[in-house]
Image: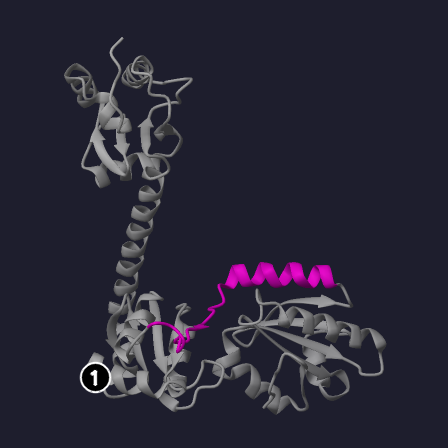
Amino acid sequence: MANQSNNEISQIATQQLFDEYINSPSIRNKLLLVHIELEQIPVCKTVNEGLLAINRDPEFMEQLAICRLNADHFYNLLNDENVNAAPTVLFYHQTKIIDRVDGFNQSDLLKKIKLHLNTIGVVQATEIKSNDNSTINNAENKIKQLLNSSPIILFMKGTPASPQCGFSRQACHLLDEHKIKFDYFDVLADENVREELKKYSNWNTYPQLYVGSELIGGLDIMKQMIENGDFESKLQQQKINEQENNSKKNLESLINQAPLMLFIKGTRETPRCGFTKELIDLLSKANITDYKTFDILEDENVRQKLKEYSSWQTYPQIYVNGQLIGGLDILKQMDEEGTLVQTLTGKQGVAV
């Protein structure tokens, strides 16, 4: 079977080896580019150089596989796919041809690669490595760091491209087959993590799959949960939790854009409701001008989520140093009590 590096594109010599190659777990679910070449044609060398450059690009390297076939040795394939000239690049996914580029056209090649990667949703597994030079003092803290670094992580022996045990190979194939994007950690690369994780999880074998830092189990449980739909439910809940966390972070980022932050309808210059206009006039009379605003009419998601976050159902909403002060009525009361300026700015008001 072909072995591919970043310095060369593997040439496959026979139809049998090619069939084995495209059916292998590490290739089947990637976007496979097959260059039909004739070595004596100079432009084929140019195509190989272009494919190598693409393969080295971090945007593509984990999602693509590339190989070469000598046109003289694959008559049946060329006849079946109506390949009449070299160079020709055939696009495969899950052993089937989905597209092609005839001749040398680097721009067309790149365009189609990006199109199909977006269309077929190639699963990209990313390796997560522990940092031996960090301030982490023990293996348990390393494990917690790894679990918090990814929504879905597989602790396995080897890598998805080169698994070092049959169970790890099957686990990767199962996740790829169901187009589940995951990160991985090679436990063979860190003996401390390998042994400590068994104690941490109370699970003595590998692979181990975690979703949202929670142990799912090994290969058998993965199979069972995928078959009965429990795994899909788990992923959906994880996505909901992730979206909620991201939404919360986004709101907190907005709230802390300035020490004094107003969420209003419209803008300072063009208020679009009576309460907002009254608020702007109140701040102006108090000589409070150093603040930022966010127009909630421009973002319905922020408008609704901020109500949930603050447990305050109306607008405007006023925040000082990330903390909700309240709405217009609260500020009017502060103004009557003489505490408005100090509360919003930290400064004492000046009588006029």
Q: Position of residue 24 (x, y in %)?
A: 51, 84
Residue assigned mark 1: 199
Q: Is residue 111 one of those drawn in magenta?
A: yes
Q: Which residues fall within the magenta stretch?
A: 106-135
Q: Secondary structure at mark 1?
A: helix
| Residue at image point 69% right, 81% down | 68
Q: Which of the 4 image quarters holds residue 142? A: bottom left
| Number of residues whose C-alpha sits closer than 10 Å to that of mark 1, classed few (under 14), some (14–19) or many (20 or more) | few
Looking at the picture, tell me which residue is in the foreground, 315 or 180: 315
Q: Position of residue 81 (x, y in %)?
A: 68, 75
State the residue lying farthest toward the top: 352
Q: Position of residue 84 (x, y in %)?
A: 78, 74
Left or right of 110, for residue 348 = left
| Three-letter amino acid code of the residue under disc 1 | Lys
42 is higher (above) or lower (below) than 1: above
Mark yes or no: residue 85 visible: no
95 is higher (above) or lower (below) than 325: below
Colour scheme in use: one colour
Q: Position of residue 269 (x, y in %)?
A: 42, 18
| Residue at image point 21% right, 79% down | 200
Q: Which of the 4 image quarters holds residue 18? A: bottom right
Left or right of 235, for residue 182 = right
Looking at the picture, tell me which residue is in the foreground, 274 or 191: 191
Q: Which of the 4 image quarters holds residue 229? A: bottom left
| Residue at image point 34% right, 88% down | 191
Q: Quadrant of the N terminus?
A: bottom right
Q: Quadrant of the C terminus?
A: top left
Q: Is residue 339 one of those drawn in magenta?
A: no
